[in-house]
C-alpha cells in the first residue's frame, strides 16, 4: 500500500501533504502555530473528517510548544483558547475536529504546566495511531460484509475521497476497498468526480491508482446510468458527521447516490469511525452544512466557466437519511439499518 504523510509531527512542526496540489505535485508545507493550521484546514490543504481531526490535535500541540517558548503561561486554558477557537471555526461539518479538540482540552490541568506541551503531543500522536488502527478494522469488517458472488468479482462505486488522504492513513471507504482487494478475485472501482472540488477525480483516482486498483472515473451525473447499465455491487462512502439516529452528512452528492442505490437495490455502506458519530445531535436536521465560495462552482482551474452574474448555491455536504443506509461500518462493528438504539449500543460495548 502506498504511504504518504497526510498529517505528521516532524522536528517540532506539523507537516501536511498539500492536497490542493494533487495529483500534479506532492508538496509538504510545515506549520508552527494553531492559527496557521486552522487556515490550512479552511483552505483545504488537509481535508476529510478524520484527517482534519488529526491536524487539529497536532495544531494544539504545536501551539503549546510555541507558547511555552515564550515562558510557561499562567493559564494554559486561556493561552490556548484563541488557537482552539480558530481551529473550531475552520470547518463546521466535520465533527472529528470538535471531537479531537475536546480530547486535547480534557488534558489541561491534568499534568504539571511545564509538561503540558509534551503531553499534548503524545495525545495527538495517539489520535493519529488510533485512527489508522480504526481504519484497518473498518476495512476488515466492511470487506467481510460486501456481497461475494460466484466469480468473486466486485464492482464498487465511491464518492469524494474517503481514503488515506482523508484520514491518518488507509482510509474509511477506501480502507474497505483496500481490504476487499485481499478478499475478492477482482475488484473494480468507479470513482465519481465529485463536483465542484473534484476530490474524486483528483484524490481518489490518484490514491487508488498508486495502489494498482482498477479505477474508472465518472462524472457525478453518470451514476444512475452506471447503476442501470453496468451493475454496481455496492456504494461505499465515508461521512463527516453521523447523527445519533444514523443520518449521515457526507460530501455533496452522497444523498443523490443513496436514492439511486435504493432505486437499483444496491447496498449503500457508510464507513466511519466512532469519532465521526455525534451523539449530541439527534438527527441530520441538526447537522451544520458548510457553504463554500461561489467561485468553486463558477470557475474551473481559475478559469470562469459559468455565465457572468448567475447566482450560486454551493453546499459542501448533504445528509443521507438513515433509512437509505444499508449498513454503517465502524471499528466496533457493522450496524445494519442504523437507528438511535443500535448506535447507542455501539458506544456501550
Ligand atoms: O470537503 P472535504 O473534502 O473535507 O469532504 C470530505 C468528505 O466528504 C469525506 O467523504 C468524509 O470526510 C469522509 S473522510 C474519511
Image (cartoon, rainbow, N blue to C red):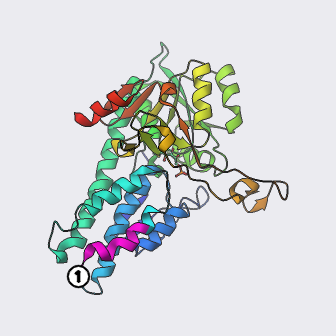
In percent of the image, x 26 and y 75: which residue is there?
76
Element type at mark 1: loop
Asked if residue 28 shows in the view, the reply is: no
Q: Can you say whether 330 is above or below 52 in the image?
A: above
76 falls in the magenta region: yes
Q: Residue furthest left?
A: 112
In this view, the residue in front, 179 or 308, is: 308
In this view, the residue in front, 45 or 178, is: 45
**Magenta span covers which residues?**
74-85
Q: Residues within 10 Å of mark 1 (few under 14, many from 20)?
A: few
Q: Position of residue 128 (x, y in %)?
A: 32, 55
In percent of the image, x 56 and y 18: which residue is there?
265
In this view, the residue in front, 321 or 167, is: 321
Q: Can you say whether 194 is above or below 73 in the image?
A: above
Q: Residue furthest top?
A: 150
In percent of the image, x 18 and y 68: which residue is there?
109
Q: Quadrant of the rendered structure where residue 112 is?
A: bottom left
In the rendered image, the quadrant that contains the N terminus is: top left
Q: Position of residue 242 (x, y in %)?
A: 43, 40
Residue underneath mark 1:
74
In percent of the image, x 58 and y 57: which residue is there?
22
Amino acid at each position: 500500500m502506498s504511504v504518504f504523510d497526510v498529517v505528521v509531527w516532524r522536528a517540532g512542526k506539523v507537516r501536511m501533504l498539500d492536497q490542493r496540489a494533487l495529483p500534479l505535485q506532492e508538496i509538504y508545507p510545515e506549520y508552527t502555530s494553531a492559527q496557521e493550521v486552522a487556515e490550512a484546514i479552511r483552505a483545504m490543504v488537509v481535508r476529510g473528517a478524520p484527517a482534519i481531526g488529526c491536524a487539529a490535535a497536532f495544531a494544539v500541540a504545536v501551539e503549546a510548544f510555541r507558547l511555552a517558548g515564550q515562558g510557561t503561561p499562567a493559564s494554559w486554558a486561556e493561552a490556548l483558547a484563541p488557537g482552539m477557537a480558530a481551529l473550531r471555526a475552520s470547518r463546521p461539518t466535520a465533527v472529528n475536529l470538535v471531537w479531537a479538540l475536546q480530547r486535547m482540552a480534557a488534558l489541561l490541568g491534568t499534568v504539571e504546566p511545564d509538561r503540558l506541551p509534551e503531553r499534548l503531543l503524545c495525545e495527538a500522536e495517539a489520535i493519529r495511531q488510533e485512527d489508522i488502527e480504526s481504519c484497518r478494522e473498518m476495512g476488515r469488517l466492511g470487506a467481510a460484509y460486501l456481497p461475494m458472488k460466484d466469480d468473486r468479482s466486485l464492482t464498487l462505486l465511491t464518492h469524494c475521497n474517503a481514503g488515506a488522504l482523508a484520514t491518518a492513513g488507509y482510509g474509511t471507504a477506501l480502507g474497505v476497498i483496500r481490504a476487499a482487494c485481499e478478499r475478492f478475485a477482482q475488484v473494480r472501482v468507479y470513482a465519481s468526480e465529485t463536483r465542484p472540488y473534484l476530490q474524486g477525480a483528483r484524490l481518489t483516482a490518484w490514491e487508488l491508482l498508486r495502489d494498482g486498483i482498477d479505477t474508472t472515473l465518472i462524472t457525478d451525473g453518470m451514476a444512475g446510468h452506471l447503476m442501470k447499465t453496468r451493475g454496481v455491487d455496492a456504494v461505499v462512502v465515508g461521512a463527516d458527521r453521523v447523527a445519533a439516529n444514523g443520518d449521515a452528512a457526507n460530501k455533496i452528492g452522497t444523498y443523490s447516490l443513496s436514492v439511486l442505490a435504493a432505486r437499483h437495490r444496491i447496498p449503500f455502506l457508510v464507513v466511519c469511525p466512532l469519532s465521526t458519530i455525534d451523539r449530541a445531535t439527534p438527527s441530520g436536521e441538526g447537522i451544520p452544512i458548510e457553504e463554500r465560495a461561489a467561485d468553486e462552482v463558477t470557475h474551473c482551474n481559475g478559469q470562469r466557466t459559468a455565465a457572468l452574474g448567475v447566482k450560486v448555491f454551493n453546499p459542501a455536504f448533504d445528509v443521507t437519511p438513515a433509512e437509505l443506509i444499508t449498513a454503517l461500518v465502524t471499528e466496533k462493528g457493522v450496524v445494519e439499518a442504523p437507528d438511535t438504539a443500535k448506535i447507542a449500543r455501539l458506544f456501550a460495548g
